[in-house]
Every structure is written in C-alpha cells, then in structure tokens.
C-alpha cells in the first residue's frame, strides 16, 4: 500500500511557513502565506470575535450534534451579508462548511455529477482550486486571466473563453481580492460576464474568500451580484477565515441559487450528502461566533469597524509600495489599483531565492506578495531589495 502511493509535495505556501520559522535572522520578513497581519506583525483575534466567544462560553449549553447542514441561523445571517435584499428569497439556500475549502469541495461534488460538465478556471488562481476540481473528476479548462508584465486582467481572453464554453459548464470567479494577483474586475467587465453567463447558460461558481478586505464589505460583492442576477443557477462558496480572522476555526458556507425552492432544497440535500460522506458535520465554534457577531448590532459594528481598519492598513502599504516600485518599473503603478492582500510581482524564481537568501524576504516562487506581511517602516527596504531585481 504505502510504497505504491505517489509522492506528494506540500502546498508551496504552507511549506514556506516552515522555512520561514526555521530562519533565525531577526530582520526576516514573511510575505508568503495569505493571513492578515497588523502593524505589529500579529494576526490577532478580532475584538468582536472575543466578545462573541465570551458570550458563547457563558450561554452555550450543549455540544450535541448539529447535522451536516450546520447551523441554519449562521447560514441565514451570513446570507444577509453576502447577498443583497432581492436575492435572499426561497430560491437561495446554503449549508455551513469547514471553511471556504469545504464549500468549494461540496460545490465541485455537485458540479461533477454531470460527466459532460467542465469548469473554466483562470490562470493563475489559488493553487488548491485545481486540486479540488481534479479530485472530484470535474473536467478543467483554463484561460489566461492576468498578465504580470502589464499587471492587467486579460479581459479579451477571459471573455472569449466564456464564449467558447458549453451551456451547463461552470466558470470559477473570485468575488474580489483575486488570489494571487489582486487584479480587480471593472463594473463594465462584470456586466459583460453577466451577459455571456445569461446568454450561454453558464453556471458561475464564486469563491468569496476575502469580502471586506478589498474596497469595502458591501462593494466587494457588487460585481458578483451583477453576475448572480443574470445567472439561471449559481453557486457561492464563502470563507469566513479572512473576513472574521477565524482561519483555524474552519468556518464557511456553500450557497446555491436556483429557480425554485424545490431545486435549491435538492442542491442543499446534495451538499449534505457529500458532507456526510467526508467530514459528516462542520465544526460548530466558528459559525457560532460569526452568528453571535452578526446577530448583535453592537458586535456587528465592532467587527465592521475593525475590518475597515484592516482594509485601510493594507491599502496604505499598497500605496507606499506602489509609489516606490513604480520608480523601478512604471507598469507597477497598476498595483495601486489592485485590491486585497495580494499582488503578483514579475519576479523569477532566481530573484525570489535571492530575496530570501540575501535579504531574508520570503515569498512563494510565483512572486505573490502578501502586503499585510509588511510593516510600514519596512516598505522602503523591501522596495529597494525588489527594485534592484526588476
Ligand atoms: N479561496 C481562496 C481564493 C483562498 O485564498 C482561500 C485561502 O485560504 C480559500 C478559498 C480557503 O479558505 P478557508 O481557509 O476558509 O478554507
Ligand atoms: O493563498 C493563501 O496563502 C491562503 C492560505 O491549502 C492557504 O489561501 C494556502 C493553502 C491552503 C490553505 C490556505
């Protein structure tokens, strides 16, 4: 058994965490794994989360099973935040999942039910997307999404890929804060995507993993809403890992939007079937925390304000870094218009090894930088180290 198994490489981002930890240089800088860090370099528990945990500790009276769909109160409170008024109807339903990853996995499972269906994925994308869709046997088709040299979305290539998709194919879209590029899709392009989705009968699958870390909590899903309103059927995978800083609590949800209450109930029943066959039920704590934050106006405001300050810290670093890097390479001025924690710099694997070995600056070989890994006073030093290589 064991000798016959294939060799498996660790996820490069997760492998980088270990490499960084074993570097004992005091000035080392981690621009690798996608977690938010504050000005002190910490990933703190949000104040609203602490308050909710305190409340739960005092009031929670049972740890009995909750079922594969998870907590329906969490699911409906989260739906109010992710969708807009007219969308939360009997034609929308969802389940709680262990993080955005499991929401994507359940989505992949129901999409893979039709052997003829393919999913269209932009490149580059979050590395785990490929693994998730390949594991369930879904056909994967790719289109080039981003040009690191110009830092622009390859709009024409993306739209013509969608034009060539078959009716019933799925298209994977990042709702905002694209991982790994940070590239934002304009309102006009969202409308063009919506038009193709409607005309060709495509199924959008949105990965909504960074809501609130881009332009604003509500703004970050406006483009998604444009497409969802046009779509006949759609799926939305939500992660609460970043938006609530709940990473290890594994909190998320998968939603289906359909044409009738009967259809979405069938979608949810299939999500629950696949959940039962793998992890049985989602862990309760993170979802209970999110529900406790969202259900209380005071805690919700505390959370929304803290999220806004996280967003503005990322924006400040982005602006400062862009000002310096664009002096070396004018195209990098576009980095300022990107959103979320990441940008993808046009660096070679040799450049990245040099930055790590000589300057103690860590990033994956792709050249993706997590801007939240920087303190404002480090921007100058990091820009000079990177600038020399551009
Ligand atoms: N989707 C994207 C684009 C991500 O970057 C991540 C990263 O964590 C996820 C989904 C999964 O998030 P979770 O930790 O909630 O599973
Ligand atoms: O892209 C990132 O850095 C985050 C963290 O299997 C992550 O999404 C990376 C890999 C993974 C889970 C989370």
Image (cartoon, rainbow, N blue to C red):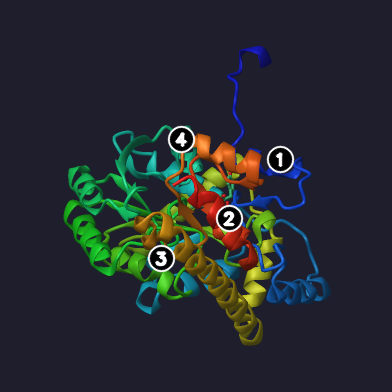
Which residue is found at the position 54% from the left and 74% from the top? 312
Q: Dots 1 and 3: beta carbons under 8 Å?
A: no
Which numbered disc flags the more N-terminal residue, 4 or 3?
A: 3
Q: Nearer the viewer, mark 1 or mark 4?
A: 1
Q: How far apart, in angstroms, are the residues tagged by discs 1 and 3?
A: 41 Å
Quarter assignment of residue 381: bottom right
Foreground residue, 74 or 325? 325
For label 2, the crowd category at 10 Å Cα-Cα, with few meaning under 14, some 14 to 19 and many 20 or more, is some
Q: Secondary structure at mark 4?
A: loop
Q: Nearer the viewer, mark 4 or mark 3?
A: 4
**Residue under pointer 1:** 18
- Please indicate whether residue 369 sits to the left or right of residue 234 in the image: right
Element carrying mark 2: helix
Q: Position of residue 209 (x, y in %)?
A: 51, 59
Q: State how far apart marks 3 and 2 are (Cα).
A: 46 Å
Query: Percent position (x, y) of residue 10?
Result: 62, 33
Residue placed under numbered mark 4 in the picture: 136
């Amino acid at each position: 058994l064991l000798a016959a198994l294939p060799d498996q490489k660790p996820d490069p981002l997760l492998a980088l965490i270990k490499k960084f930890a074993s570097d004992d240089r005091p000035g080392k800088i981690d621009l690798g794994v996608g977690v938010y860090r504050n000005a002190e370099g910490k990933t703190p528990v949000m104040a609203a989360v602490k308050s909710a945990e305190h409340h739960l500790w005092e009031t929670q009276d049972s740890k009995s099973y909750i079922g594969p769909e998870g907590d329906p109160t969490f699911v409906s409170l989260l739906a109010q935040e992710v969708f807009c008024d007219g969308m939360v109807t009997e034609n929308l339903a969802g389940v709680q999942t262990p993080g955005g990853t499991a929401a994507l996995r359940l989505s992949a499972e129901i999409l893979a039910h039709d052997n003829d269906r393919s999913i269209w994925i932009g490149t580059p994308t979050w590395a785990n997307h490929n693994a998730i869709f390949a594991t369930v046997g879904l056909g994967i088709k790719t289109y080039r999404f981003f040009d690191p040299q110009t830092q622009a979305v390859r709009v024409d290539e993306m739209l013509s890929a969608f034009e060539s998709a078959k009716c019933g194919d799925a298209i994977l879209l990042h709702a905002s804060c694209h991982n790994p590029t940070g590239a934002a899709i304009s309102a006009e392009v969202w409308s063009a995507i919506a038009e193709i989705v409607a005309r060709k009968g495509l199924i959008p699958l949105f990965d909504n993993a960074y809501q609130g870390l881009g332009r604003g909590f509500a703004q970050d899903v406006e483009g998604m809403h444009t497409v969802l309103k046009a779509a006949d059927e759609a799926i939305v995978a939500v992660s609460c890992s970043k938006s609530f800083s709940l990473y290890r609590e594994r909190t998320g949800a998968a939603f289906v939007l359909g044409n009738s209450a009967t259809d979405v109930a069938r979608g949810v029943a299939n999500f629950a079937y696949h959940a039962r066959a793998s992890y049985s039920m989602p862990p309760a704590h993170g979802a209970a925390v999110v529900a406790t934050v969202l259900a209380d106006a005071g805690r919700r405001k505390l959370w929304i304000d803290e999220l806004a300050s996280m967003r503005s810290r990322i924006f400040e670093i982005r602006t400062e870094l862009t000002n310096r890097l664009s002096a070396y390479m004018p195209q990098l001025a576009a980095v300022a218009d990107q959103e979320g924690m990441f940008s993808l710099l046009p660096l070679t694997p040799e450049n990245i090894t040099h930055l790590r070995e000589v300057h103690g600056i860590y990033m994956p070989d792709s050249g993706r930088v997590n801007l939240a890994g920087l303190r404002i006073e480090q921007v100058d030093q990091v820009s000079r180290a990177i600038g020399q290589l551009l």
